[in-house]
Amino acid sequence: MEDLSKIKAVAEKAAQDAGNYVLEHVGKLKEISHKGAFTNLVTDVDKGSEKIILGAIQKEFPEHSILAEESGEHSQGNAYRWVVDPLDGTTNFTHGLPIFCTSIAVYHGDSVKIGVIFDPNKNELFTAEEGKGAFLNGKKINVSKAKSLSESLIVTGFAYSIEGKIANIENFATMISKAQAVRRLGSAALDLCYVACGRFDGFWELGLSPWDTAAGELIAREAGGKVTTLEGARFDIFNKEILATNRLIHDEMSSLLSNDEEIK
Ligand code: IPD
Ligand code: CA
Ligand code: CA
């Protein structure tokens, strides 16, 4: 077993260095292109941030596997697998909307061991290690105490796919009439962190990728939250759908959400 505290320190520094690089480039974009749909953007800054993070990992742990959003798989087969989103909230970033972050997780065995998410706009570093709690800038965080949807502020997101019926619209309509309010911030990783620190009481989304959820799902669970599929089954980072709550409103949300519209 590797020294997890060293792995965590490398992840924290890489997330902060890359996040600060992203922040420095707000409004200075050289290149925006599309991945498939016109709604799915990638910029030179996504790629530059990923380079910083991969460089840091490969310097310290050259044998570890990496799954990174923009460059895919590296050194497959190692027991340690880093899962990297170099910029979560790219659309917000391209518009100068300060809701984006970097997200780094380390997967080992059948679960995420370390999760680190850095929001350079608010200088907020969310961290978690399996079994050791979740932290915001070093201070322990906990999920909220809201007991029902009617007293809950919840959040969701919509996948980039815009062909045919827009997935999640019916869930959104249902939740708007049941929750105190529903938000859509545009960064799944921050949505999970905000459940972890009690700013949101619940979050659900369909059509996600492992780099969107890997670090955040550990942070939410370590803060006392519950993370499952929409139906309440065990969540794995390769599941596309996620329901993360303060635990108290989990069953109520799960009973109302449907994955019938999930993007294949
Ligand atoms: C996206 C964000 C967004 C979510 C999308 C993700 P990206 O990630 O997390 O909130 O709704 O499904 O793809 O593309 O900004 O890294
Ligand atoms: Ca993402
Ligand atoms: Ca991204």
Image (cartoon, helix red, strand yellow):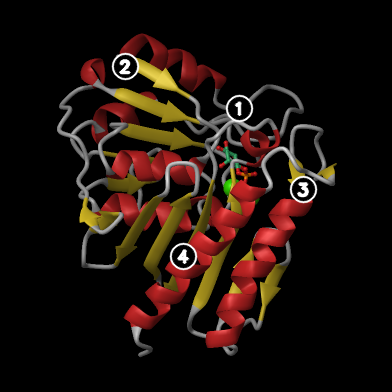
**Vertically, is 86 above or below 179?**
below
Q: Please, what secondary structure does the residue beneath circle 1 have?
A: loop
> Disc 2 marks which amino acid?
Ala
Q: Residues within 10 Å of mark 3 (few under 14, many from 20)?
A: some
Q: Nearer the viewer, mark 4 or mark 3?
A: 3
Q: Which mark is residue 260?
A: none
Q: Disc 1 and disc 2: Cα gap in Å? A: 20 Å
Q: Residue at x 61, y 27 (%)?
A: 167
- Residue 33 pos. (x, y %): 84, 43
Image quadrant holding the C terminus, namely: top right
Q: Residues within 10 Å of mark 2 (few under 14, many from 20)?
A: some
> Disc 1 marks which amino acid?
Ala
- Residue 116 pos. (x, y %): 42, 60
Q: Nearer the viewer, residue 28 or 178?
A: 28
Q: Residue at x 21, y 18 (%)?
A: 151
Q: Position of 142 compared to 40: left or right?
A: left
Q: Which residue is mark 1?
A: 167
Q: Please, what secondary structure does the residue beneath circle 2 have?
A: loop
Q: Is mark 1 within 8 Å of ligand 1?
A: no
Q: Residue furthest top?
A: 177
